[in-house]
């Protein structure tokens, strides 16, 4: 399964982008594609695994998105709390 980092996610619109860990390419993600115990939000810096599917227009989109961690961005070794 591909892995990537959430770069943007607008909770009002229910969509955002994930940057693929291997290729650096961005892929769209929609709230309906997030499948983790009913949690339907992503936050910038979340590390996710996902499958690649097609949207109605034939473009690529992330499906079956699952959070697996987060990007350390503050230089502090203390863990970030999950916000569920």
Image: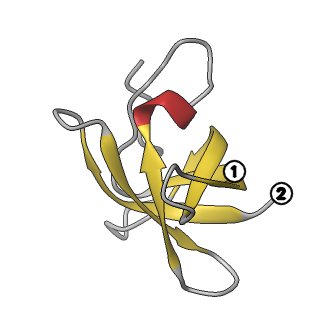
In this view, 80 is above or below 77: above
Q: CA distance from mark 2 to mark 1?
A: 6 Å
State the quadrant of the N terminus: bottom right
Residue extending farthest bottom: 23
Residue extending farthest front: 57
- CB atoms at circles 2 and 1 under 8 Å apart? yes
Location of mark 1 (residue)? 50
In percent of the image, x 37 and y 68: which residue is there? 73
Residue extending farthest top: 38
In percent of the image, x 62 and y 26: which residue is there? 35
In this view, 50 is above or below 33: below
Tell me which numbered mark, 2 or 1, is placed earlier along the sequence.
2
Left or right of 82: which side holds 3? right
In this view, 9 is above or below 23: above
Crowdedness of circle 1 by 10 Å Cα count: few (<14), some, many (20+)? many
The number of numbered badges drawn on the structure is 2
Task: Confirm whether residue 16 shows in the render.
Answer: yes
Quadrant of residue 23 in the image? Answer: bottom right
| Residue closest to the eye, 7 or 60 | 60
Left or right of 1: which side holds 27? left
In percent of the image, x 37 and y 25: which residue is there? 83
Quadrant of residue 66 in the image? Answer: top right
Quadrant of residue 42 in the image? Answer: top left
In this view, 45 is above or below 24: above
Residue 79 place in picture, x, y as percent: 47, 44
Q: Secondary structure at mark 1?
A: strand
Q: Secondary structure at mark 2?
A: loop
Residue 47 place in picture, x, y as percent: 56, 55
Residue 32 place in picture, x, y as percent: 49, 29
In percent of the image, x 51 and y 63: which residue is there? 5
Left or right of 24: which side holds 3? right
Location of mark 2 (residue)? 1
């Amino acid at each position: 399964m591909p892995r990537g980092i959430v770069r943007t996610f607008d909770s009002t619109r229910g969509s955002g982008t994930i940057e693929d860990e291997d290729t650096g390419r961005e892929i769209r993600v929609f709230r309906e594609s997030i499948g983790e115990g009913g949690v339907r939000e992503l936050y910038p810096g979340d590390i996710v695994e996902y499958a690649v599917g097609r949207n109605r227009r034939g473009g690529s989109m992330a499906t079956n998105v699952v959070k697996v961690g987060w990007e350390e961005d503050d230089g502090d070794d203390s863990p970030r709390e999950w916000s569920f």
